[in-house]
Image (cartoon, helix red, strand yellow):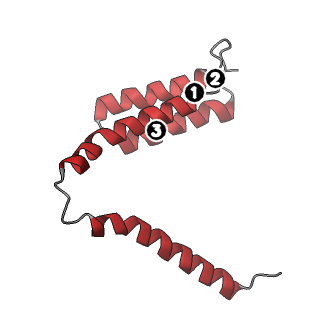
Amino acid sequence: MEITMSQLMVFMLVMASATFITRALPFVLFDKHSDHPFLNYLGRFLPPVLMVLLLVYSFKNETFISLDFVPELLGLMVTLVLHLLWRQPLISIVVGTAFYMLLVQTHLLG
């Protein structure tokens, strides 16, 4: 079965609409309840919890016996230092990720 360009465009339009609706729906539904204590609690504590989960997921397969985890550790350290210095999450994440990718792609550590 061959997919035509018009079918592909319709598919992309449907997917873009579904993505937009799922992103906008919470703001529409919770507009009147934005000062609810539970939502304030989630807004305060959920981002750090998600960062810890991502950190645990990143290191879950590491053995820590060999030095194979050094690029990940250095990338994490660069991200942490930049975040503590500037308090700009986007900058620290982008630079830390770029530093990690540089280490991995160029094999600077062996």
The residue shown at (25%, 50%) is 39
| In this rendering, the label closer to the viewer, 2 or 3 | 2
Residue type at the position of mark 3 = Val
Q: Are marks 1 and 2 in contact (CB under 8 Å)?
A: yes
Q: CA distance from mark 3 to mark 1?
A: 19 Å
Residue type at the position of mark 1 = Phe
Q: CA distance from mark 1 to mark 2?
A: 5 Å
The residue shown at (81%, 82%) is 2
Q: Secondary structure at mark 2?
A: loop
Provide the residue designation for mark 2.
62
Q: Are marks 2 and 3 in contact (CB under 8 Å)?
A: no
| Image quadrant where residue 32 sits | bottom left
| Image quadrant where residue 4 sits | bottom right
Q: Nearer the viewer, residue 67 or 49?
A: 49
The residue shown at (70%, 20%) is 110
| Nearest to N terminus: mark 2 or mark 3 | 2
Provide the residue designation for mark 3.
95
Q: Nearer the viewer, residue 31 or 77?
A: 31
Query: Residue 90's x, y, as percent?
Result: 38, 45
Q: Which mark is residue 59?
A: 1
